[in-house]
Image (cartoon, rainbow, N blue to C red):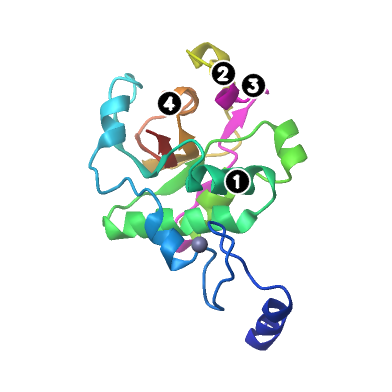
Amino acid sequence: MSLFFRAFIELIFPKLCWGCKKELSFHSNGLCLACEFSLPYIYFKGNYLLDISSELIPPLELKKVFALYYFYEGGRIEKMLYETKYQGIQTISIYFGKKLAAHILQQKWSFDGIIGVPLHKKRKRKRGYNQVDLIGQTAANLLSIPYFGTLIERIKNTPMLSLIKGNREHIVKDAFRLNRKVTLKQGHYLLIDDIFTTGATLKACAMTMENLSGLELSIATICCRS
Ligand SMILES: [Zn+2]
């Protein structure tokens, strides 16, 4: 789309900030500066997630475990996640993907590829896309590494874990399997999801890869319940 045409469209339909819904300037990427700075960044706080998950996935040694933001009930991140998952605002997932790539570059980390936690095909069909794919594909493009959105398959359409109180491990156990049609070269891969709550989903996904040789695994999520 040409700049002129974009400017014309935005004159008629001004872009609104995802956070405060105020009108945005032409070059803004979806959040106004005030909202961007008010996001609850987590990554200044060290290995917060690592403490939770070091015992979580015993057979697999995780190299790095990190999240970008804290998740608070009723907070801005919850609203953005809801809008990108259920209201079709795909640009929010793309924004998160850019932030993930920027964080990895800033830390001077390198990965051989990104692996996304899949949705069950029925849920994906209903939603039209998997927001984790959008996040992962965006980050992978910016880092010039491959994205694997179909390496892990979700074979059980589990209920929404956010609605389940207590232990969720039994729900996602055996919900995933490795897609043997996708080959993964040896290397260090980043498994990603949008939110880390108890780690049950990420653990179940990571376990599908426990027999792959020469695999090093790290985990990242966009946000983590505080
Ligand atoms: Zn705003």
Assign the N terminus to one quadrant of the image. bottom right
Q: Which residues are magenta?
A: 142-164
Image x and y of residue 224, in percent: 41, 36
- For the residue labelled by badge 1, is the local secondary structure a helix, a strand or a loop? helix
Instruction: Please check the rendered image and state whether residue 35 is part of the magenta-colored stretch, yes or no.
Output: no
- Give the mark nearest the N terminus, 1 or 4: 1
Q: Amino acid at mark 3?
A: Thr
Please count the marks in the image.
4
Q: Which residue is mark 1?
A: 131
- Give the mark nearest the N terminus, 3 or 2: 3
Q: Is residue 189 above or below residue 61?
A: below
Q: Is residue 179 visible?
A: no
- Residue under the point 54% across and 59% down: 20
Mark seen at residue 199 = 4
**50 with respect to 215 (left or right):** left
**226 with respect to 74 (left or right):** left
Q: Looking at this view, name the residue that lies furthest to the left.
A: 46
Q: Nearer the viewer, residue 173 or 35?
A: 35
Q: Amino acid at mark 1?
A: Gln
Q: Which residue is mark 3?
A: 158
Mark seen at residue 164 = 2
Assign the C terminus to one quadrant of the image. top left
Q: CA distance from mark 3 to mark 1?
A: 17 Å
Mark 2 Cα shell of 10 Å, populated few (<14), some (14-19), many (≥20): few
Task: Single out the mark in the foreground, 3 or 2.
Answer: 2
Task: Single out the mark in the foreground, 2 or 4.
Answer: 2
- For the residue labelled by badge 2, is the local secondary structure a helix, a strand or a loop? loop
Task: Single out the mark in the foreground, 1 or 2.
Answer: 2
- Give the mark nearest the N terminus, 1 or 2: 1
- Give the mark nearest the N terminus, 2 or 4: 2
Q: Image quadrant of residue 145?
A: bottom left
- For the residue labelled by badge 4, is the local secondary structure a helix, a strand or a loop? loop
